Amino acid sequence: MRLTDGRSGLELIDRLECFRLLAREPVGRLGVVLDGRPFIFPVNYLLAGESIVFLTDAGTKLDALSRSPVAFEVDGVDARTQTGWSVHVSGSAREVTAFSSADLVRRIESLALRPWAPGDKGHCVQIVPEAVTGRRIVHAEETS
């Protein structure tokens, strides 16, 4: 049985399916607030359990993460059928350092996490989800 949002008619995606969708996509968008202004950055990432991890260099992303909650979003679209889905994660982010949990550091080191963008990406960031939601566009003929 599919659950739908009564207001929008979009299919609601359960948490387990949200993580399955997150795991299959290589790029998402990180949303942060810095000096009262929103910023959105594309990042390539991997999952470490239910944490989202990515590499970055020093700068806006790294400066903003410790100051406020973050948002992370991944989408899949099919323009031909006008269908798609979106997974939204909100939570906190922190830099993974030598002082982080040894288990977390081992899990991250076992991942083949390699930044796509050039430059020194010497900082590993972990997003810890507090809320995970997903929506899917479903046309009437698909629900029959």
Image (tube, helix red, strand yellow):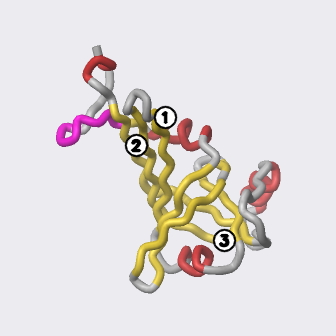
Residues packed near mark 1 inside 10 Å, few (<14), some (14 to 19) or many (20 plus): few
Q: Report the residue marked by disc 2.
A: 134
Labels 2 and 1 touching (C-beta < 8 A): yes
Residues packed near mark 3 inside 10 Å, few (<14), some (14 to 19) or many (20 plus): some
Mark-to-mark CA distance, 1 and 3: 27 Å
- Viewer-nearest residue: 120 or 129: 120
Identify residue type, mark 1.
Answer: Glu
Labels 2 and 3 touching (C-beta < 8 A): no
Q: Report the residue marked by disc 1.
A: 17
Secondary structure beneath disc 1? helix
Magenta extent: 6-12
Labels 1 and 3 touching (C-beta < 8 A): no
* Tally of marks: 3
Q: Which mark is residue 95?
A: 3
Identify residue type, mark 3.
Answer: Glu
The residue shown at (54%, 78%) is 64
Where is residue 137? Give x, y as percent.
34, 34
Mark-to-mark CA distance, 2 and 1: 8 Å
Q: Who comes first in sequence, dot 1 or dot 3? A: 1
